[in-house]
Image (tube, rainbow, N blue to C red):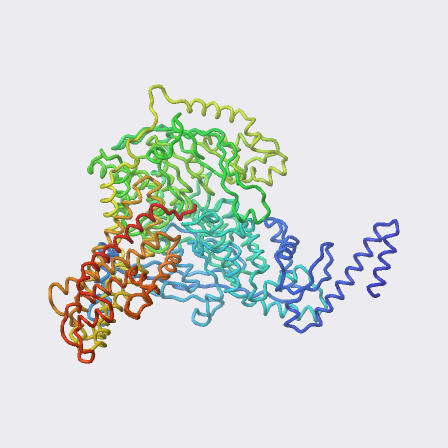
Amino acid sequence: MDRGDIYKSSSSLRGNSSTFFSRSSRREEDDDEEALTWAAIERLPTYNRLKKGLLATSHGVSNEIIDVTKLGLQERQKLLNRLINVAEEDNEMFLLKLKERIDRVGIDIPTIEVRYEHLTVEAEAYVGSRALPTFTNFTIGAVEGLLTLLHILSRKKKHVTILKDVSGIVKPRRMTLLLGPPSSGKTTLLLALTGKLDKTLKESGRVTYNGYGMDEFVPQRTAAYIGQHDVHIGEMTVRETLAFSARCQGVGSRYDLLSELCRREKEAKIIPDPDIDVYMKAASTEGQEASLLTDYMLKMLGLDKCADTMVGDEMRRGISGGQRKRLTTGEMLVGPSKVLFMDEISTGLDSSTAFQIVKSLGQYVHILNGTALISLLQPAPETYELFDDIILLSDGEIVYQGPREHVLDFFESVGFKCPERKGVADFLQEITPSSNMTLGLQVLKSRGFFTHARSNAVADSRHGKKRGMVLPFEPYSITFDEIVYSVDMPQEMKDQAVMEDRLVLLKGVSGAFRPGVLTALMGVSGAVSGYPKKQETFARISGYCEQNDIHSPQFTVYESLLYSAWLRLPAEVDSNTRKMFIEEVMELVELNPLRNTIVGLPGVSGLSTEQRKRLTIAVELVANPSIIFMDEPTSGLDARAAAIVMRTVRNTVDTGRTVVCTIHQPSIDIFEAFDELLLMKSGGQEIYVGPLGRYSNQLIKYFESIEGVSKIKDGCNPATWMLEVTSPSQELALGVDFHEIYKNSELYRRNKQLIAELGKPAPGSNDLHFPTQYSQSFLVQCMACLWKQRWSYWRNPPYTAVRFYFATFIALMFGTMFWDLGRKYSKGLDLANAMGSMYTAVFFIGVQNSASVQPVVSVERTVFYREKAAGMYSALPYALAQVVIELPYIFVQALSYGVIVYAMIGFEWTIQKFFWYMFFMYFTFCYFTFYGMMTMAAAPDHHIAAVLASAFYGLWNLFSGFLIPRTRMPVWWRWFYWANPVAWSLYGLFASQFGNITNILEMENVSVQEYIRNYYGIKHEFVGVSAAVVSGIAILFAFIFAVSIKVFNFQHR
């Protein structure tokens, strides 16, 4: 039957009154047409056949042959919606369809089993003062390293064992959870199994994949390691990041599997599901700029709503921390790896999102025969239940490995029983933190100490015990009533046809935060103790603990606190009292053991995430604030570390301060450490503002009283239950608006009454007022900032020491290259060579100085934004300190270079000439360094600053007076010569060394003085003018740097 006959048949049936027969006929017609179209695809050569598929039309008919590599965005979205309409519900069915297609032709999906036997990882490190990364230690270390290499000295580093003879198996088709306290070796184990250990670590033992050693294949192509640090390119969108990752990783064995699958289907005359076929072909085709696999991953990870949003970084606003973490996960999942090693992938995610991601991974592992070892922090009970096996690490040793369902029985058999209302994962983490884990007395003591410490904090809270402090403070409450907050509509949302100009984030939010009450924000500005809030005074009585934990990397913990207290405590607090207060705060936040530890950079060196979080809290506490806001204080921490931080928070509240925390996926213990909760729904409206009650009973009672809300199950985390029963999907299913229910509740009326009471100033009280904007005077700010920069530079040898040794090396190289040229001036060529030595030095070292200072200023500027916002100092003291600290380092660099070069080139040894040589070299290096700082201050990041700075290097080079002497330049371009800093440097250097020499040149038959005056236009009497101009240029660049730091703020967050 041809198309015309089918059409006529269909038309006649439509005329019939029977709808059933009409639909049957159309279905048969569609099936026949689909079979014919599929037969056409089957006749294509294999290469073409694997790129062609059938795409369903708007009527659901699959009769259009398409190239899977050329699917448009809308076509991909429609296809994906047919395959997975709701990710939470449809993903398992989708994966089963993929598996069914593969099973139907008898293909077994290969599995990978990872074994590790007697795996030991060791490191060597300096201890004590030698561990500090100072200029001196860097130099000594370099010399020691050379002598050790020559076997003259033995190594003086301490031996540290990270993993101690561990053995085990990571099985396919099973989800394995890796648990352990901080520094237990989790990350090292994951890296060792992936073949990505740092080369400086010593590894022994054997790791195999299906029996093959790591040297018999490329493990990095077989296994994917997903790190705990979210490092992305801030200027790329989420979709671009995933697409780029997918293209770089390729499709692996997916193409070969598809080729064999299609061959067997053709032999068996099997017609696959068209949508599944298109998906598999699209996912197996390399080099696509935008792929269906990328769209699938965006949907699975809940990133489809922010797919076209820039990722952002510490300087520019982008996606949230939770979205960033999911992007890090997705970046590796779009690749072809069959083995997944995932390090703390739930950091910053709420419990429901973490559950959904782990559930999806479990579906992949169980259905498509994957292998997964996943390290999680604070997994909620329902997430923990998704795993099949557990590996428990402590102090580099495995203390349990086996099925999840047997772990409690094992620990109960050795005397440890999991308490009621305690998540199993939290229980396992708490019994392991011991410096020497052997199941016995050590563990018992460790657990007993932990329990005792926590019970004290809770008891102090319940009995209203207030901790005494050296410095008194005034308790303040905050009230906010019907707060509306909106921002400009993001361009990404405008591109998606959103018509509004403003995006409303808060819609009429009301509430009160009180002293001695710990409030959780889950999901606001206002008035302070009855007086309208003024930002300049509010910053003096409040502290804000950012989620990002931004600190100066070269400071020790104690120095960080000393610096914050120095600049933020009132001027009348003397040094001894300040130090006593710091000691109290360190004890409160449990930082005494880390007193002399370098803070370091996140994920690179220094403090762990949990320790860095406590330092963030302590830095705010030493300012003695009355009100503290904390943004996700337990984000990124395991159960034990989170408990320590929350104990710190609880201790802070017990001093009578007002503390408000935003929080994600809290465990039961953490959630119930709070006194009150402000719960908001999507759209910026509150749905519960009130007390939690003992065991969250008041919160549970409130929501269970709403008709249709499911009751909480025994042992369930109230925070998780609360988020689930109030989700938008539940609102839709119940046909209710939780915000309206709250607005009509007795709780809301009580809150409005409380706001009215606290919103009135107390009798006899005065509004907040401070005589100055900052706690300390301008001079003290300068001293403190200079003190900070002094340590930051001294402990940054990759910048200071390398720059010094680079200049020394260049001096020796130029000295040998231009050997004894300073005494040769019998010909004009000799003078040109001498000027060339000056020209190369100015540009070679000057440009290097300019480029190397930019990343240093970039790191410090990020810290500056936080400290300035906290009211520690103004921009000018910071800028002045940054400039002044460079001066001695540049002087040593110039002296090292100048002495070596001056002697080897053989310039005339007179005090005056040597002084001028050093003067011009010093200020030249200064203005190049300040030029790099200036461009950094005027640019959003050091990459753009480098481009901006290099724009002038070429012009300075061309108009320096060396390549083309000023006298040979066109008249209309000579103005740029006089505006060129390098030209003034060369003028001063050349005039001071040769401008007064009266010896006669042999070939030119004129004096040296006359020759350089006529040929170069350089006069000796202008040396003083050159000196003034060169030093003035350095001062000008430093001044522009200071102004730029003050005026420009590139932190768009």
Camera sees residue 136: no
Residue drawn 65% across the image and 72% down it = 46
On the rendered structure, is 485 left or right of 894? right
Front one among 275 and 454: 275
- Across and down, in percent, residue 346 comes to 47, 49
Q: Residue 728's quadrant in the figure?
A: top right
Q: Residue furthest front?
A: 971
On the rendered structure, is 1033 left or right of 654? left
- Across and down, in percent, residue 574 comes to 20, 36
Q: Residue 737's quadrant in the figure?
A: top right
Camera sees residue 126: yes
Q: Residue furthest bottom?
A: 1003
On the rendered structure, is 894 left or right of 473? left
Q: Residue furthest top?
A: 763
Total labels: the figure holds 0
Front one among 514 and 544: 544
Residue drawn 16% across the image and 66% down it = 899
- Across and down, in percent, residue 196 comes to 41, 63
Of the 4 image quadrants, the one containing the C terminus is top left
Of the 4 image quadrants, the one containing the N terminus is bottom right
Front one among 42 and 90: 42
Front one among 980 and 235: 980
- Across and down, in percent, residue 511 comes to 46, 29
On the rendered structure, is 318 left or right of 733? left
